[in-house]
Amino acid sequence: MSDGEREGRHEESHGGALGTRLNWLRAGVLGANDGVVSTAGLVVGVAGASADRGTLLTAGLAGLLAGSMSMAAGEYVSVNTQRDAEKAALAVERRELREDPEAELDELTRLLAERGLSHDVAREAAEQLTARDALRAHADVELGIDPDALTNPWHAAWASFLSFTAGALLPLLAIVLPPASARLAVTVCSVLAALVLTGWASARLGGAPPGRAVVRNVAGGAAAMAITYAVGALLGAAGA
């Protein structure tokens, strides 16, 4: 057996765990991307109206904190809702197993047979799985849930907070550290480079060709910076 085949079989045997890790990585990359784009748009827009370093720092920090807190709160609420749904589904399954175990055994047999097993093999497998842990068997085969690994809203919230913050720090530092004459160029170049990286990473994690994802990512970020800079420049010229 080749190394590639071994790797493929290894990933198949740990498909659930691998999928969970990829989802977390993808969420982290997208959170960082959001931090880069939103903060870059904010600080570049302010730079169009004012060259004052203190103003830029204040605006960037405000955007970073507001964005990271918003991302964390939204992720916490979303994952809590998912966790509640998972717990409710497990409670229903637990009640059904208690009230009508034979019907549940028949259902598990049917589900296993639908996956390609013969009826006799499916029945034997269902009986063995039920004897070992009936709830876990139904949670896995019927619901696609691991009762011992329910989604954690606090983990999701912290992951979103940290990834957004990491992304937002790049344009913030790029706009306040260089001298005024190079500030905008350094920010735009560093942001576009970061968008190339996050676009490539999100595409690879999603199994998609990276070319289009990178172009879309860079084009969106560049448009956001151009529009906010133009608006800031207009407001600054108007004395707003």
Image (tube, helix red, strand yellow):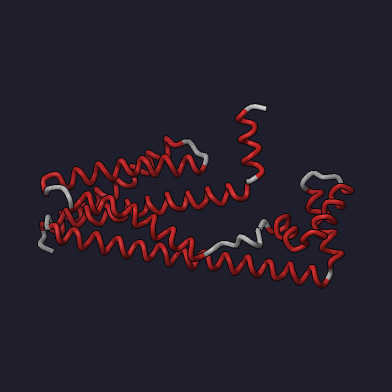
The image quadrant of residue 106 is: bottom right
Residue displayed at 25% across by 41% down: 189
Residue closest to the eye, 221 or 154: 154
Q: Which one is in front, 108 or 3?
A: 3
Whether residue 154 is situated above or below residue 183 in the rendered picture: below
Residue at (67, 27) in percent of width and height:
1
Q: Position of residue 76 (x, y in %)?
A: 47, 66
Q: Which residue is drawn at the image coordinates 59% and 69% (left, top)?
A: 84
**In the picture shown, does residue 65 fall above or below 8?**
below
In terms of image quadrants, where is residue 197? top left
**Residue 170 % position (x, y):** 28, 50
Locate the C terminus by quadrant: bottom left
Position of 176 with respect to 144 (left or right) is left
Q: Position of residue 47 (x, y in %)?
A: 17, 54
Asked if 146 appears above or below 202 in the picture, the reply is below
Q: Is residue 99 left or right of residue 139?
A: right
4 left or right, relative to 167: right
Answer with left or right where residue 194 lies relative to residue 136.
Answer: left
Give the residue at the far right of this rendering: 120
Residue at (84, 69) in percent of width and height: 100
Return the x and y of residue 108 as percentages of the image width and height: 80, 57
Q: Nearer the viewer, residue 118 or 3?
A: 3
Question: Which residue is outermost to the top?
Answer: 2
Q: Is residue 187 above or below residue 135?
A: above
Q: Disc count in the image? A: 0
In front of the other: 176 or 41: 176
